[in-house]
Amino acid sequence: MIYCKKCLTTDLRPNALFYDQICIACQFSDVEASETFNVKLNILKDKIKKTKQNKKSDYDCIIGVSGGKDSSRQAHWVRDRLGLRPLLVCGAYPPRQMSQVGANNLSNLIKMGFDLIVATPAPQSASHLSLESFIKFGNIAKSTEMSLFSTVPRLAIELGINTIFWGENPALQVGDSAVEGNDPFDGNSLRNLNTLTDGGNSWIHDCLAKKHLQDHYIYPEKLEFDKKHINIFYLGPAWDDWSNDNNALYAALQGLELRPGEESITGDISNASMLDEQFIHINFMLKYYKYGFGLATDFINQRIRAQIISRDEGIKIVEQFDGVCSEEIIKDYCMYVGITSIDFWNIANKWTNKKLFNIQKGKRPIKKFKVGTDYAC
Ligand SMILES: [Zn+2]
């Protein structure tokens, strides 16, 4: 496992790309610093102008939202700075999974004067597919993420709205090279996201067919995008101050409810992400056991690139919080999908990287490596 010389990204991250031992996210942040805000804003405006618009629609664009910290900032910015009429679309969690904080935050968006469509998968299929994707891929949120990313373009196609905005560009923010587009705003390669491509679609087709369900979990084909002139743009690169910390601050001022003091339960050092449900923290923990990095690494990398903290300070925080997820959250998930906690750990252990962790039957794995130091595996 090789670490980026500037941040704490490793070559075990899916689709990681390094030049001279520096990850693409760090490379981009150096380029970004040299471009001014107005130049970037004008590039985005030009790109939007060139996009074919459906004049008959009541909306100019769709913004994919979760009700979390990025959503209100995106919605205000598109309406007030770009002067567009946005429709917000949320691929939400079923009621049994969604937190009260998440529901309150969606209500807050409507109160601020935005139109919002919420699409929710049926709870039975959602829990069934979560367990299937845990067993098959070691990822409890794969089906949920597929539904979340697919709902937005499916609705854009159905409603005839050509422009879609997402927030962060995963290539630039976390270094996923598979989704790199022609420029920092180009989101049309989102279909290559690891969670949408890994394992293909046939497993989910099979599960859904058995239950006679519609497959709104499947991302629309490129042909459908082209036929309807659908274009996806990332907003994150247009902002000099786009970061988890800044977005949380902005959203809190707009009425977003946070989860203060819960970092030792959720592992989320920002207390401001994934507010709409808590099973996602299990997934960050599983990612940590699979690849050796978790949610804290992603946050700390941004802070290192923004020169808020040093790499050495970051290592101490990542050592403490990567992989944290309370037994309580795991117990709730086991009840949700109908397994015991011993079953849970036996499945999780199957997906754990044995070179990075020692396995204990029916229990949590134990870490063998040191964060920030290259490790032979
Ligand atoms: Zn880096």
Image: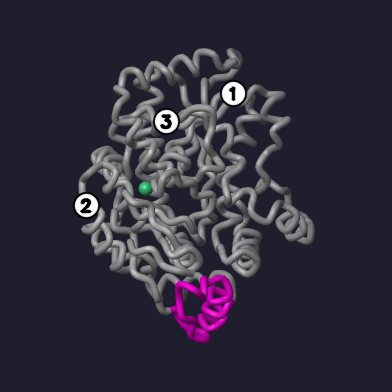
Is the C-beta separation of discs 1 and 3 under 8 Å? no
Q: In the rendered image, is residue 184 in sight?
A: yes
| Residue 216 x/y as whole percent | 67, 45
User: Horizontally, is 57 left or right of 310 in the view?
Assistant: right
Between 363 and 313, the one nearer to me in the picture: 313
Task: Give residue 235's mark.
Answer: 3
Task: Check if residue 342 falls in the magenta segment.
Answer: yes
Between 177 and 110, the one nearer to me in the picture: 177
In the image, the residue with mark 2 has its CB under 8 Å from the nearest atom of ligand 1: no
What span is in magenta? Answer: 339-365
Q: Earlier in the sequence, mark 1 or mark 3?
A: 1
| Mark nearer the viewer, 2 or 3 | 2
Q: Secondary structure at mark 2?
A: loop
For the point 56% across and 63% down, the residue is 139
Q: Amino acid at mark 1?
A: Asn
Q: Amino acid at mark 3?
A: Leu
Q: Which residue is mark 1?
A: 162
User: Horizontally, is 252 left or right of 288 in the view?
Assistant: left
Q: Which residue is mark 2?
A: 310
Q: State how far apart marks 2 and 3 are (Cα).
A: 27 Å
Indicate the quadrant where residue 100 lies. bottom left
Q: Is residue 314 above or below residue 61?
A: below
| Residue 76 x/y as whole percent | 36, 28
Q: Earlier in the sequence, mark 1 or mark 2?
A: 1
Indicate the quadrant where residue 236 lies. top left
